[in-house]
Image (cartoon, rainbow, N blue to C red):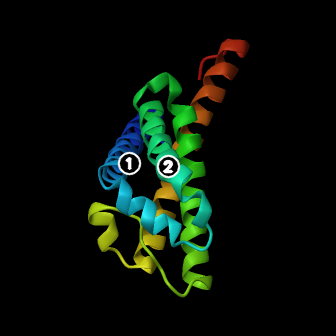
């Protein structure tokens, strides 16, 4: 893939995550009481629901900010990848081991079934890894060029 295509792909992936994280964080904050109650019903989260009900939307908004600022995008993709991996593992656990599947998602995302949500998360986890890979390769490529002083 050409460098300009990687830059465009990175911008598109960043925009998708910014939309996703701002939307989900805003929904969680607007419907905070409901979000906290549903989290408290989770067998994995339970007692930590109060802290996580605030921490998750704050992390999502912080990640969106990192992705918005081009010089911090590498960290934004790393954060997005970690969040998506955690969400994906959580959903997988819930599908495999939980009898009652409370959904703490808001808005349109809450209309998905748990298997659909898993596919959605796997897709976003994959594009977070791709975005991170693009930002890391671009930085490594530039550093090698500067040190070697050889044109590409």
Q: Is residue 64 above or below residue 49?
A: above
* 136 or 48: nearer the viewer: 48
x and y percentages locating residue 89 in the rendered image: 61, 67
Give the class, few, some or many, for how many residues have Cα within 10 Å of label 1's Cα (few <14, many ≥20): many
The secondary structure type at the circle numbered 2 is: helix
Which residue occupies 52% across, 26% down? 72
Q: Earlier in the sequence, mark 2 or mark 1?
A: 1
For the C terminus, the quadrant is top right
Q: Nearer the viewer, residue 67 or 114?
A: 114
Q: Which residue matches tag 2? A: 56
126 is higher (above) or lower (below) than 152? below
Q: Secondary structure at mark 1?
A: helix
In the image, 116 versus 23, the foreground residue is 23
Between 8 and 125, the one lying in front of the other is: 125
For the residues labelled 2 and 1, say whether their Cβ atoms are less than 8 Å apart. yes
Q: Residue 44: image x %, image y %? A: 62, 69
Name the residue rendered at 45%, 75% in the picture: 102
Q: Residue at x 44, y 46 (%)?
A: 57
Seen in the image, is 7 located left or right of residue 141? left
Residue 91 placement, left or right of 18: right
Q: Is residue 4 visible?
A: yes
Whether residue 130 is visible here, answered yes or no, is no
Q: Residues within 10 Å of mark 2 (few under 14, many from 20)?
A: some
Measured from the top left, where is residue 26 in percent x and y?
Answer: 32, 47
Q: Look at mark 1 in the image and give the residue it sits on.
A: 25
Q: Residue furthest right?
A: 148
Residue at image location 54% in from the left, 72% down from the top? 42
CA distance for labels 2 and 1: 7 Å
């Amino acid at each position: 893939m050409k460098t300009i295509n990687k830059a465009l792909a990175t911008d598109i992936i960043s925009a998708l995550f910014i939309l996703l994280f701002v939307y989900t964080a805003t929904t969680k904050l607007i419907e905070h009481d409901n979000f906290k109650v549903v989290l408290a019903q989770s067998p994995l989260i339970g007692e930590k629901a109060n802290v996580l009900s605030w921490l998750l939307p704050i992390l999502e908004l912080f990640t969106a900010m990192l992705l918005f600022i081009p010089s911090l995008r590498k960290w934004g993709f790393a954060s997005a990848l970690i969040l998506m991996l955690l969400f994906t593992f959580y959903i997988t656990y819930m599908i495999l081991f939980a009898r009652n599947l409370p959904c703490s998602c808001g808005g349109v995302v809450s209309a998905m079934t748990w298997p659909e949500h898993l596919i959605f998360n796997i897709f976003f986890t994959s594009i977070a890894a791709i975005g991170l890979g693009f930002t890391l390769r671009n930085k490594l490529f530039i550093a090698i060029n500067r040190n070697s002083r050889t044109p590409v």
